[in-house]
Amino acid sequence: MNFSMGRQPSFSSMSLRDSGRARSKAAVSFVASKPLSRSASMSMSDLNGLSNLSFNGLHGNSTNEKEAMQSLNSRLASYLDKVRSLEKSNADLELRIKQLMLDRVPKGHDIDSMMAQAHALEQEVCGQCPGGLLNLMKQRLLACLLVCTVAELRSSSRSIERLPESPERSRSFITLTRAVSSYNLLLLLLFPLSLQEIDSLRVRVAQEEVSVEVDAAHGPELGTILFDLRSQYEGIVQKNKEEAESWYRKKVGVPRGSGSEPVLWLHVTLHIMQQFLLKPCKINLRDQTELVAALEGNLGETGQKYTLEMERLQATLAQLEENLSQLRLDMQRNKTDYEQLLRIKQNLEMEICLLFKPLPPPKKTQEPDVRTRKIVKVVTQTMINGKVVDESSEVEQIEETKK
């Protein structure tokens, strides 16, 4: 009778039951661990042979059965001892791997050594640049940085003075911006050294290997397990390195050039000049834009105000012109009435004078005189756009005497 590879053998012997009770804890840990189940499946052929012997001995005497069971118990005990030794070796291996990973963690950077390397690189670049061109560029850069810093401080103070609503927020924002700029500058200066350290770490990790020796009866299966563990840990290490590299490149934000050190220094200088030259210009442009917007708003309000005032004055002027024209018409009408009344008065006075004139002495009988009086009245009116502007009248008297 043969047993399957994925199934544990069961025995009904009293001695096997007693030995199983004595070693129950070891058997439970053996079944629970996944990698060690492979080692159990390796030696199933021996167990199958022993089980065949035990089942074939059922037809014999009881002495052979007891001997077979005792040999089976001894083999199972030795197998459990091997399992415990493998568990212990696995635990030691895990501790060694963890310690090795902790040793491979990069230590903190030494600023003094980095500054020494930076000075050495600076001297090398100065030697490569002809005619002291790099020194001149550095002096100009320092002067530009000083001027831009002063301009930035002045513009920031002016912008804070123009914003009385939240000065603390503006000051904190400006302080944070300056801190970010300084950190960016520090990162840009340390970028080449960090790249060199990353390359050296890659080379060292690629060269180093973990070698572990374990005393076990079944070497190939244990080697397979170790190979799986090693590949798993190496995958984790590679993933961590890639994540750290991507994070570092994302934080630094400067593309890695393929040129020499002077080209990299020029890129860094260009980035710094852009940061310190464009930033105050942007702040000044923002202030000027806000000022222009405020002036445009004031100009629009003033224009609207004066437009309303002019419309009101034009309406008043039109009303006054209408009143003036009406007054002129009234004055002309009054003048005409006055002239008419004056002429009537003169005529009445003349008639009264003629009536109260003393009669002449009687004369000889003469032929009666026929006196004819003609009164001619001429009225002249001046009209503009259907309105009477000027009006005048003349009265003439013509007397004729006939005998």
Image (tube, helix red, strand yellow):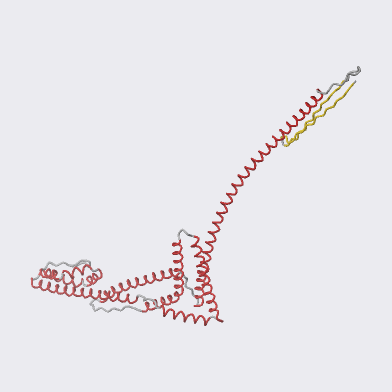
The residue located at (49%, 62%) in the rendering is 161
User: Number of callouts in the render?
Assistant: 0
In the image, taking residue 43 as reference, residue 240 lies left or right, namely: right
In which image quadrant can residue 217 be found? Answer: bottom left
Residue 247 in picture, x, y percent from top left:
41, 69
The C terminus lies in which quarter of the figure?
Answer: top right
The residue located at (16%, 66%) in the rendering is 10
The N terminus lies in which quarter of the figure?
Answer: bottom left
Decide: is 120 above or below 31: below
In the image, taking residue 163 as reference, residue 351 lies left or right, namely: right
In which image quadrant can residue 293 be found? Answer: bottom right
Residue 21 in picture, x, y percent from top left:
13, 69
Which residue is most to the top?
365
Residue 226 in picture, x, y percent from top left:
29, 74
Q: Nearer the viewer, residue 111 or 289?
A: 289
In the image, taking residue 103 as reference, residue 5 lies left or right, namely: left
In the image, taking residue 112 as reference, residue 403 lies left or right, namely: right
Residue 228 in picture, x, y percent from top left:
30, 72
Q: Nearer the viewer, residue 217 or 317?
A: 317
